[in-house]
Image: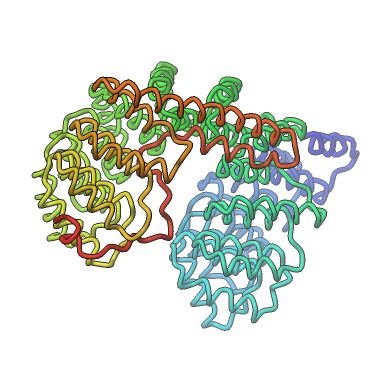
Amino acid sequence: MGEIRNAEKLFSEIPVKNVVSWSVVILGYAKNGFGGKSLELFREMRVLGLEPNTYTIVGVLVGVGGLGDLMLAHCVHGLIVKSGLEFESFVGTALLDAYAKCESVVDSCKLFDQMEKSLVSSNAVLAGFAYNDCFEEVVLLFNQLRMAGLVPDGTTLITLMQGCVALQSQALCRPIHNLVLKLGLVSDTFVCNSLLDMYSSFLDLDAAMMIFDAMEYKDTFSWTIMMGLLLQFELAHDVMKLFCLMRADGIYFDAVVLINLISASAILGDLKHGRQLHAQSIICGFGSYLNLANSIITMYSKCGDMDTSRSVFDRITGKSLVSWTAIVSGYLQNGQPREALDLLLEFREQGIHAIDSVSLVSFLSACGDLALLKLCQQLHCYAFSAGFSLDRSVQNCLISTYSKCGNVQLASNVFKEMGYLQDVVSWNAILNGYGINGRGETAVSLYHEMKKRGKVPDSATYLCILSACSHSGLIDDGLRILSEVVEGNRIEVTEDHYGCFIDMLARAGHLLEAWRFMDGLSERVGSHVWRAILNWCVHHNEMALAELVASKISDQDPNESDHAVLLSNVQASLGNFQDVEALRSGMKKNSKDALNWQHVLLALEYGAGEHYLCDLNLQGIVRFPSFQFEVTGRTLNVGSLHDNII
């Protein structure tokens, strides 16, 4: 703004102004976003009797495009014809751009048809299509121009790549890439960045890495795109390595790079380095960047530090919807739905009405965790009035939320109203809803209906239906479904699937069968499954089996004291006080060992191995259900299920 003011001051001091000086200041105002001022100056110039030249008209057209005033564009077009400038390619290209900025693709196409075709005018009309989200027209026109003999340049291909991404047409990636190679544009950083961005949009890590490694010069945007893609695959350590290479290459980082690094810390659960990056963002003067603040909120939330997360949130002056969603999601992830709900109510009191689907899903999740049916219904009404009836993620969340609130009928209504929007997630949500509300028979019936309709169950589907069978004691149905999973070989059978079936047997009192089934698994079963069996042994007062199970847990995890506490209480209730004393003595020893381990952790925090501290702490505090147990890349191989049950 200061520069344009200086230019205006110099312009006012010119004693005799000609068309050149007028044209320069008109274009200057137009390019700086002051279209109205540029048109005022143009009128003054005309009043003085000066005739516009090519550059004057271009400046006026830039101003008109900035204002988006189609009527003015038509008026200037008439002036161009009257002035005899319609055949000037420079003017024609500017007029194409003005019509596009005024959202008149029709006028732009009419003008282009009347013009002599050139690479510049072709790029202008293609850019106009892209500006108005007419990406199919971008591809069609490009093909027509190629057939007419047009040789594209980097600008052409960048626009075409935007169309490829917008249309989600991955098939276009390779032909466009081949054109880049054929035209020798691999040294053009802007073109290579567009290629990187295109492949990143399709999560093609191999192709993106190949382009990135071959680039002669990488700017900050190149590194940022690559970091963002690595984050999509949660390759947080690689993001950190890439940042080191970037700094070694002499490239300075910006706020977006810091956002990527903070996101990497969030994935790793690395609170210490996350704090350092937070401090660095303040030192670099990025403290007021809203997107950066939002990523910091998310990082602290994922690292379990909700106090600091809330502190950052409270200091944001102009909170966006993303800010509210980030803090609400953080409270939900950390098992604090009450705080999430308080924020939701505060959000509503502030009169912020433009809730997007991501925020709505977070707020509904808070209602579900607290079983707030009335508030859920209010949010449902909002979703309907705000046009989210066709948003699959919102509808699926409504099914889950109503189910958690105990109203499976409303959940079923939402499911039925979805119609063609139903996907596997929708079916899983309603199956789980019937299961947690004790309607296992309906869940099994719906599961068969799902398969009849051609929906292919996934791993989560089988977890939902097995859990439903467990809660309703449907052992035969559960066995048939588990056999279907194992024999189908379509999905990986995890410990969670077996855990559901084992819980089903134990819940129904078939503890010996559950023991035999687990003992028959050829691979080691997680201690969380054994602890579940131990709970049921105690519940059914099967102390002999409980001691065997406790022994298994102790073998797998000698430092785990939960099972010892449970056995100690049971032995005390049976009057076996000598056994109680023995168990508690062992617990004291383990407690002393745990204290020593804390000293080791403190030493690590201030020593050379401090980067391990956060991981160790996280392993110590996580207390999630069995579905969080890591079984990636491993399949439990068993023989005949029927043999193990007998």
Image quadrant assignment for residue 337: top left
**Above or below, comparing residue 109 to residue 420 in the picture:** below
Name the residue located 63 percent from the left edge and 53 percent from the top edge.
227
Left or right: residue 405 versus residue 273 is left
Quarter occupied by the N terminus: top right
Total count of labels: 0
Image quadrant assignment for residue 153: bottom right
Name the residue located 70 percent from the left edge and 46 percent from the top edge.
31
Across and down, in percent, residue 631 comes to 41, 53
Between residues 74 and 539, which one lies in front from this camera angle?
539
Across and down, in percent, residue 233 comes to 52, 55
Residue sitting at the far front: 578
Name the residue located 56 percent from the left edge and 20 percent from the top edge.
314
- Is any part of residue 569 visible from this angle? yes
Across and down, in percent, residue 381 comes to 25, 29
Across and down, in percent, residue 4 comes to 79, 38
**Above or below, comparing residue 271 to residue 391 in the picture:** above
